[in-house]
Amino acid sequence: MKLIRFLCVFFPTIAVASPGALSISWDNDLLTGTDKGYTNGLRLSYLGPTAENGRDCDMCLSHIAKDRLDWLPVIGRNGNSHTLTLSLTQLMVTPENIQATGPVYEDLPYAGYLSGSGTLWSWSARSLTGFGLAIGIIGPDSGAKATQSWVHKFTGSTRPNGWDNQLGTDVIGEIHAFHARRLFRKKMANSLSQEMSWMSGGKLSNFISSGELGVSWRIGTNLPANLIPDYAGASSTIGLPGSLDSPGPGWAAFIGAGVEVVPYTYLEKQSGRYDYDQRLLVGLAGIGIGWHAPGFQLAITLRATTSQDETNKDALSFGTVSAAWRF
């Protein structure tokens, strides 16, 4: 619980002390009518000011990170802008039968995850690259039991009774990298624009180690400057540069698809008697709609993946509500 208190105090303090933007997203499978597997996720992110922002950023975290990490590919490249995203993430996994008080060995175990992360971004008008670190915990100190109990009480859903059997406690570490490139952006009739981008990413972690490749297509009015919708991946990646930089109010519809290679997951490694066998290759898809204005963004997304479990052919689906605003 000490880590939860520290992170909850640290992120608001950073946001108040420095100009930037805040983002929040909520994943929940209740939005797609299911309640199993990856069942809930919450992420709060702070996007710092651009390191190249003159004297206003001489001592800001983005500028310091850029100078210290200029040995990484692309970081410090002339003509690129740089900024830092700090995120607090909580995720949880549950079996389908959450009424049972004992372990349901023929299904997924309960697992809660809480982490803090930092990602340094370098971007231009056509490309975006990020490198980051995360540290967190799995187990009772993640606060997942309390969060899901509150959400289910608030939504009038079934009370989860099996959290006393959750996996953990373990410390989690992660390094991750991300790259995206815009393929095209074209103006259309009636003030419409469309664009397409591809993206790739990978993470090495004792929670999930994976690699991802995908494409996204977006259409709308006054499209923001970000290369991809912040919500196009398998999980919410909010706090991306350019997402709040639009020439005026507008809307966007978007669709994304991709594939993920998952050679390692904590759930499979620590599952013990639970019947879980991670599938190596997983398909990803997402569709949604968003509304934006300079300094503000709101989006609703529906996501799906092919089955994560070799022994369970059911697809995974969930919805995401996300918002971001500059202060």
Image (spheres, helix red, strand yellow):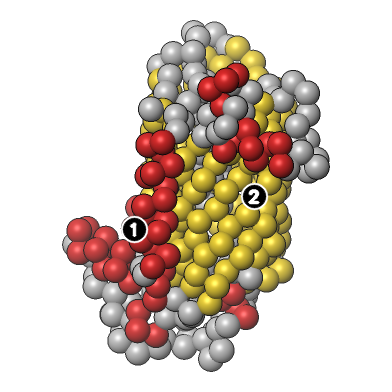
Q: In the image, 321: left or right of 154?
A: right
Mark number displayed over residue 30: 1
Residue occupying the far top of the picture: 190
Please report the residue visible at 58 percent of the width from the left and 57 percent of the height from the top.
134
Which one is in front, 74 or 58? 58
**Residue 150 appears at what percent x and percent y?**
24, 63
Q: In the image, 131: left or right of 45?
A: right
Q: CA distance from mark 1 to mark 2?
A: 30 Å
Q: Secondary structure at mark 1?
A: helix
**Residue 310 appears at what percent x and percent y?**
62, 75
Q: Quadrant of residue 181?
A: top right
Other residues around mark 2 within 10 Å, as few (<14) / some (14–19) / many (≥20): some
Q: In the image, 285: left or right of 74?
A: left
Amino acid type at image mark 2: Gly
Q: Secondary structure at mark 2?
A: strand
Is residue 55 visible in the rendered structure shown here? yes
Mark number displayed over residue 307: none
Q: Which dot, 1 or 2, sits closer to the camera?
A: 2
Q: How many marks?
A: 2
Q: Quadrant of the N terminus?
A: bottom left
Q: Quadrant of the C terminus?
A: top left
Please report the residue visible at 30 percent of the width from the left and 86 percent of the height from the top.
101
**Mark positioned earlier in the residue sequence (1 or 2):** 1
- State the residue position of label 2: 132
Which one is in front, 49 or 185? 49
Please report the residue visible at 20 percent of the width from the left and 64 percent of the height from the top.
153
Amino acid type at image mark 1: Leu
Decide: is 163 above or below 299. Answer: below
